[in-house]
Image (cartoon, rainbow, N blue to C red):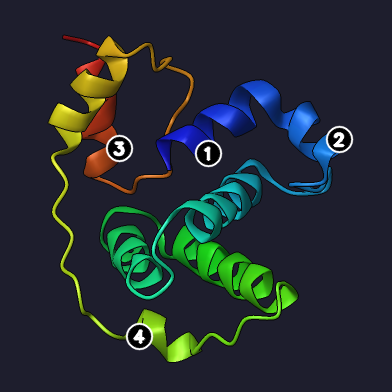
Amino acid sequence: MFQATADEADARQQGIDAGFIADWMTKEEAVACLYAQYIFIGFDAKYSPNAVGNLLKHYCPYEFYVQFVNFYIHIVRKNGIFFDEKTFDEDLINPIMDIPGSGREMRSKGYKKHWIPQFKEPFITQWHNCYLE
């Protein structure tokens, strides 16, 4: 999610030009679309969608979770792969994320303050506080 957020913020036009996102997409839609593509391309197809879905359900606004699910299903089907949508309904993995620790780690690696992840409260406040320390 962090990479998708950074890419949307600083390389949106390149994403549009390459066909990864559409120019009509909101920031949130573009991040969800990029994130879905990153998960599809780079992670285990059996467990990763569920793990990511549960992470988004817990830490992000519900609308962002729904956008991710819709884009992921579209990408999978576009590539001719059968995917059971019920995968997202199962709570196979309970994600735990250290938001302050993640924020400090990302900041130390050059993550910019304006690359704001799609967290909901109180997590977004915890994230912002990492840049105030």
First in sequence: mark 3 vs mark 2: 2
- Quadrant of the rendered structure where residue 46 is? bottom left
Q: Residue at 82% of width from left, 46% of height from top? A: 19
Can you identify the residue that label 4 sits on?
Answer: 89
The amino acid at mark 4 is Asp
Q: Residue at 21% of width from left, 79% of height from top? A: 92
Q: CA distance from mark 1 to mark 2?
A: 16 Å
Q: Residue at 32% of width from left, 14% of height from top? A: 109
First in sequence: mark 3 vs mark 1: 1
Q: Secondary structure at mark 1?
A: helix
Can you identify the residue that label 1 sits on?
Answer: 4
Can you identify the residue that label 2 sits on?
Answer: 17
Label disc, if present, on residue 124 of the rendered structure: 3
The amino acid at mark 3 is Ile
Q: Are marks 2 and 4 in contact (CB under 8 Å)?
A: no
Q: Are marks 3 and 2 in contact (CB under 8 Å)?
A: no
Q: For this view, does 23 lie left or right of residue 33?
A: right
Please name whichever residue, 33 or 127, is drawn nearer the observer in this view of the structure: 33
